[in-house]
Image (cartoon, rainbow, N blue to C red):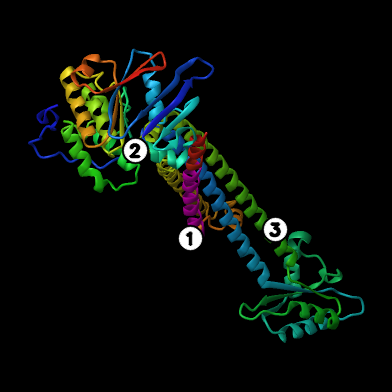
Amino acid sequence: MIRFENVGVRYGLGPEVLNDVSFEIEASSFQYLTGPSGAGKTTLMRLMFLGLKPSRGQLTVFNQNAATLTGVPLAAARRRIGVVFQDFRLLDHMTTYENVGLPLRVLGKDEASYRADVVELLEWVGLGNRLDAYPPVLSGGEKQRAAIARAIIAKPDILLADEPTGNVDPALGNRLIRLFFELNRLGTAVVLATHDYHLIETFPARRLVIDAGEVLDYD
Amino acid sequence: MSEEETAPRLQLRPPQQPRTSGPIVPPGSIAGRALVAVISIMTFLACLAVGAVVLVSDTAREWQRDVGREVTVQVRPIDGVDLDRELARASDILRATAGIAVVRVLSRADNERLLAPWLGQGLPLDALPIPRLIVLELDQRTSADLGALRVRLTQEVRGASLDDHRQWRDRLALVSRSVVALGVVILILVMTATALSVVFATRGAMASNRDIVDVLHFVGAEDSFIAREFQHRFLVLGLEGGIYGGLAALLAFLSASGAIRFLYGQAGEQQLAMLFGSFAIGWTGLAGIVLTVCAVAAVTAVTSRWTVRRYLAA
């Protein structure tokens, strides 16, 4: 699904933040991306959601070379990827419902055709009573769940979540992780970036460990 | 993981119905008020130009029609030639010519009256070699062959010449065309200035909405979708500004028309009325103003779309 072959990334003329990274994310797989702060997790995530192009090496996403993806094919590839950002990236001028429905709206779907799906998903993540609330008035946990709902509403082939439990209490964190496992059970590949080792031990899965820009372990 | 743990929570209350989705580009994020003001002013100027062109060309057309309806035949006195006889011969020829509705031979008294403003009254005009005039009014239904008439008069009436005021009409046509050309140039300049304002406003909007554009990209929006959203927002602003400017121009013309009526009978009224008629721009002017408003809105929308596409491509 996503294959890294000797991928290196540097910002400008600085040192490489990722160095000869090689691994493959398979369809319907579940893995944690872990490592200490500054290890290169966020850069790796950016490469995977096509927000960054590698400086060298080959990155293949859905059998297409990410370095040459532009325009309509790039947008089409991004639609197959759901992303949960660490800082949520919800649009403050749009309600929770509008934020979650955004991926379907950009597909050109009529609102009447997806309204029920969005409402149902928001009910599912416990935001059924916050449909018309704007992000600035949502709690951290509510924003997190809204961001997750937005990432999965269009049924992506792969879900990338960057520290999705970083802003919520342990109980809600456990609920969110269970939600990711449920999604994975339904066929979505999941990459969950975290450095919460307690979480990894509680909900064991494959681990991609990265440190100093290199892959240390992919068990 | 147990089935119980993974099962979603059931909601017991009926689901809430959300409001219909609003615009993706937030209305308040663009320097909307300032842009609407700029577009209003530009539209106002463009509508004034269009209205002035319509007014002047309508008035010029009326002048040309009035001038073209009348033809003057002049019979100059020649030594040894009986002027009255030549005048009568010219009059007979003219009355026998098709396409001429009225033939009016100006008497010596008429001549004196016409020359009085320049020469004063009481002068012995009979002693001066003053030509006699015949004023013709052309028939609106059938056209007279003025070329043939001119030749015949020259050949058969000594000292006769025909003046169809072509020179005047040509000059009027030239002035009219010049005013229209000037109006078009002003319109092009105003549209260009509007487009440039929109380019800067769009760039500003893109920069201040960078996070929105990023999110749209990450959820799979194509550049055309993003451009369409911005274009829609700018079309609304363009229409809003255009309508304000168009209404202001309409108000200006109505005020001018009212002022002409107010000046009725006062000094200067006749000159103004002669130049611009009653300042009523009529349906043509009104259509011009509506078209200008639509054109400004369209220029705003298309320019913003083009700017967004270029911005995203860069």
Chain for disc number 1: B
Residue assigned mark 1: B283
The residue located at (84%, 83%) in the rendering is B156
Q: Which mark is residue A80?
A: 2
Residue in front for this viewpoint, B277 or A60: A60
Q: Mark 2 and 1 residues: CB-CB less than 8 Å, in contact?
A: no
The mark closer to the camera, 2 or 3, is 2
The residue located at (68%, 61%) in the rendering is B173
Q: Is residue A3 above or below residue B66?
A: above
Let me know if residue B252 is in the magenta part: no
Q: Amino acid at mark 2?
A: Arg
* Highlighted magenta segment, given as a residue range: B283-303
Q: Residues within 10 Å of mark 1 (few under 14, many from 20)?
A: few
Quadrant in the picture for residue B144: bottom right
Chain for disc number 2: A
Q: Amino acid at mark 3?
A: Leu
Location of the N terminus of chain A by quadrant is: top left
Q: Residues within 10 Å of mark 2 (few under 14, many from 20)?
A: many
Residue A95 seen in render: no
Predominant SS of the magenta segment: helix
Residue assigned mark 3: B174
